[in-house]
Amino acid sequence: MLKTLLTFLIMLTAPHIYAQSNCDLPTTDIGFKVIINDVSDEISEDDKLSKSKDLVSEACLTTNQIKQLLEVITYESYKVEFAKFAYQYCFDPINYDSIYDEFSFSSSTEELKVFIQSQNKE
């Protein structure tokens, strides 16, 4: 709890350290509920991935919100694809390593790690 509070206070005072350049404020809880409900309403995994990308590209999400969206997606390869895509719309990329818990295979975790490292070098 204390760590979360300290992280929040730091983010308020120095958001440029945490937020991606195109991500000023995270989506509200109400806004996120709309996003996750829209994605959950899709039947096929292809449609869930497509809808997730469409909605996230218009939003700014926290790492925790991205994790919740990953829980709606079943296929591992789609989870990795979405996690890579969503990284650019993440408000708190410093916490993105918690996404690794959503993967079943270590190869998926490694693929996302390599991707994030490549993004941070740019």
Image (cartoon, rainbow, N blue to C red):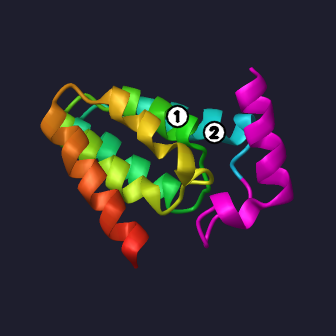
Residue at image location 24% in from the left, 37% down from the top: 45
- With 14 as the anchor, is 63 left or right in this view? left
> In the structure shown, which secondary structural element does the residue marked by tag 2 occupy?
helix
User: Residue flagged by tag 1: what amino acid is it?
Assistant: Ile
Q: Is residue 121 visible?
A: yes
Choose between 104 and 68: the one closer to the eye. 104
- With 117 as the anchor, is 120 left or right in this view? right
The quarter of the image holding the N terminus is top right
Name of the residue lying farthest toward the bottom? 122
The quarter of the image holding the C terminus is bottom left
The x and y percentages for residue 53 are 40, 55
Dot 1 corresponds to which residue?
36
Q: Mark 2 to mark 1: distance in Å?
A: 6 Å
Q: Is residue 12 magenta?
A: yes
Residue at image location 42% in from the left, 47% down from the top: 52
- Find out whether the residues at labels 2 and 1 contact each other: C-beta distance under 8 Å: yes
Label 2, residues with CA under 10 Å away: few <14, some 14-19, many ≥20: many
Dot 2 corresponds to which residue?
32
Magenta residues, start to end: 1-25
Quadrant housing residue 8: top right
The x and y percentages for residue 119 are 37, 68
The x and y percentages for residue 28 are 74, 42
Quadrant housing residue 24: bottom right
Q: Is residue 17 magenta?
A: yes
Name of the residue lying farthest toward the top? 1
User: Residue flagged by tag 2: what amino acid is it?
Assistant: Phe
Relative vertical location of residue 16 with respect to residue 49 in this rendering, above or below: below
Residue at image location 52% in from the left, 34% down from the top: 36
